Image: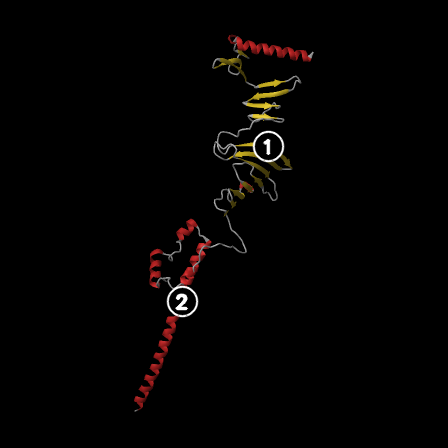
Amino acid sequence: MKLFNLQQNYILFLIFIKSSIFYSQSLPIVGFGDVSNYRINTYDVPGSSGLDLHWYGGMRFGDVTSNSVMQITNGKVGIGNTNPAVKLDVIGTISSYEPLALGATVNSFQLINQRSGNVGENTIINRLWTYRDKTLNNWYSARIHDGISIDDSYKTPNVDTQTWWERDPLDNIQSWGNNAETYLTINKGNVGIGIKTPINKLDVNGTIHSKEVKVDMTGWSDFVFKKEYSLPTLTEVEKQINEKGHLENIPSEEEVLKNGINLGEMNSKLLQKIEELTLYMIDVNKKVKELQVSNAKLVENNEVLESKIKKLEIK
């Protein structure tokens, strides 16, 4: 009896559809006296017409099993799902014999799969994305992104840590801390510690403690000791200090506060000044020795003169 009623309803529905197509003058059919929210009508298409089904609460389709197999509500379509949460929400397997386009713009992406769950107060999410990052005509240029998110994974003592790796293909690898403070970021080959958007291979917002730092150099300051090097005179150095307020080739305080310093470059410049200072000291030492020799001769001559004066006084 139940099967007979379903068949009877199906036949009536087909008759209604057929009548709507060929005798559209009997439409619209209005429900609850509200044509804006409840109507069955037609709309014009070139050379024909289309069927307009508009029902405020959505539309639900069932099958012979009496199960609801499709739901349209709030602009969302559910298949095997009577409560769709996105534009197309499918419970079950999707089979396609044609490629699935990602979209019309570069950097478009789709979420292929997501699995999530809770462990105590912690939330774990794993996502798999497909991402197209080339020009519009390069549809084959795509990447697969696998991401994992562990939110609030550490709560002692009262620190909410978020650790995730590419949970969104447009974002980067990050590890967060309390109040969304970024502890670690990896973005486009750059690493940031305490900073969200590193622009150098390593950006650190804080102090670095290390046993040793090695810097590769392309040159060094030993050119100061070459014969062709023109050592500035101390008069020139004094003039530079009086006019500029800093040594030549050394950045000013204003420049350092604004741009920081390059360790390798600064060490080389400081060594240049040390080597120049060494040359000044060598020159001063030579002059001191010359003065010592000259002074010794003066002392010797003075002693001779004193001896002669004494002899004259005796006479």
- Name the amino acid type tagged 2: Met
Q: Secondary structure at mark 1?
A: strand
Query: Is 50 in front, or is 37?
Result: 50
User: Dot 2, how many residues are within 10 Å of its Cα: few (below 14), some (14-19), or many (20+)?
Assistant: few
Q: Position of residue 47 (x, y in %)?
A: 48, 13
Q: Nearer the viewer, mark 2 or mark 1?
A: 1
Q: Quadrant of the N terminus?
A: top right
User: Dot 1, how many residues are within 10 Å of its Cα: few (below 14), some (14-19), or many (20+)?
Assistant: few
Query: Is 154 in front, or is 244?
Result: 244
Q: Which residue is mark 1?
A: 113
Comes first in the chain, label 2 or label 1: 1
Q: Which residue is mark 2?
A: 281
- Residue at x-position 35% and y-position 79%: 297
- Name the amino acid type tagged 1: Asn
Query: Is 252 in front, or is 96?
Result: 96
Residue ranking furthest to the bottom: 315
Depicted 49 relative to depicted 279: above or below? above
Q: Indicate the quadrant where residue 96 lies.
A: top right
